[in-house]
Amino acid sequence: MSQLIVDIHTHVYPPSYMAMLRARKTVPYIHDPSDGAEPRLIILSSDDDPATPLDQRGRPVDTSYSDINVKLSFMEKHGINCSVISLANPWLDFVPSDEAQTWAERINDDLESTCADVNKDKEKKPLFAFGALPLSAPSETVVNEIKRLTTLPHIRGVIMGTSGLGKGLDDPDLDPIWKVLEETQLVLFLHPHYGLPDEAFGGPEVINRYGHVLPLALGFPLETTIAVTRMLLSRVFDRFTKLQILLAHSGGTLPFLAGRIESCILHERKFIANGGDTPGPERSIWEVLQTNIFLDAVIYGSAGLQAAVAAGSHDRLMFGTDHPFFPPLHDEDEKWPSVTTNYQAICSCFGDEKADSIGMVLGNNANRVLRLGLE
Ligand code: 5CU
């Protein structure tokens, strides 16, 4: 059989979510220009700059975000055999607390039925999904939704941002959620959205001068790195040793900075514990990277990918595309450079003599870890 290719980083905004964004006037929202031009998704806080005309704020949002047939065509074009779809950022983080559960059920049931419908048709490539969480609700509600997700046959994990219940991922109130994820062995796909404060880049005026380059290229990866480091420092991985987390964008900068993080912990054991005598984490970052963390291979270059392989291993890395983000700017018919660069980075990172490793990263790891049952 030819090489199995599984895309584990591929997003959707189901139609109900698009309608919800259209009804909003604050970030995140969708604006439909009156001249019939393509709708705009105003998604990052820096997008909503009053100095920018509304019709030009944010980024264009087309049917590739919500029409599953567009995703299936994209898979066909790029030789992808199976995709594990997930709601895109900012998920349900902004939904009022008393509506969060209803929205989570709506989105998750929608994802489940999309996968079930597609998978009924053997001509189509199979789909699975990561469920969304009602994180603005109390942790008990989140725990119940995670338990409900285990009853939906196509759900293989959950996707979550770095704010957790609103206070970051070292919040002790998240413990019941870590516990149920550990018990159910659902993989947690951890994905950034909030980036760094605008001031880190010189303010909104500087950010907008360069489009989304600064927040996406630097803000997102650092956000992920900070979030996981806070989990490590607060000993989440000591308390929940079986937690399985998949980090977006090859872990942000975590593989590259792991040695420095570990060194700072070792040299500042008392300091990191609130200035007191409470010990820092017992398990090293290296052990956590090799037992609790999977990384996607969405890093667009072999240097970053080599760091990811060195920090984890080739059997903890999984191919992804980030569709529908980063479409080609010029020729709509060409293969997406954002996909081909990731594919080439995987091939060049391992070389011809390591076909097994390439196969694992392109699809076999996802098939095994997410129990996709693909042959
Ligand atoms: O790079 C990415 O993963 C993304 C994403 O998922 N969402 C987004 O708004 N921009 C870039």
Image (cartoon, helix red, strand yellow):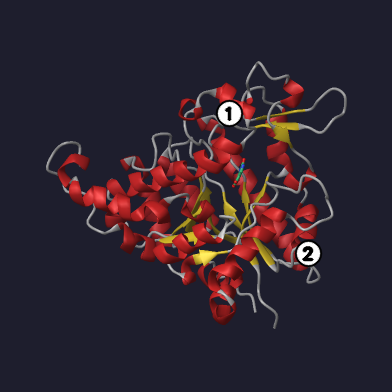
> Helix, strand, or loop for circle 1?
helix
Residue type marked 1: Ile
Q: Tell me which numbered mark, 2 or 1, is placed earlier along the sequence.
A: 2
User: Which quarter shows the C terminus?
Assistant: bottom right
| Farthest-out residue, left | 277
The percent coordinates of residue 365 (x first, y second) are: 54, 71
The quarter of the rendering in which ligand 1 is drawn is: top right
Q: Position of residue 150 (x, y in %)?
A: 52, 59
Give the residue at x 68% y 30%.
58
Which residue in the protein does label 2 denote? 76
Rendered image quadrant of residue 46: top right
Residue at horizontal 65 percent and vertical 59 percent from the top: 341
Q: Which residue is mark 1?
A: 207
List x then y, in percent, for residue 161: 50, 43
Q: Badge 1: how crowded within 10 Å, few (<14), some, or many (20+)? A: some
Q: Callout 2: few (<14), some (14-19), or many (20+) C-alpha neighbours within 10 Å?
A: some
Tell me the kind of residue under disc 2.
Glu
Separation of disc 2 and disc 1 at Cα? 36 Å
Quick check: 57 left or right of 246? right
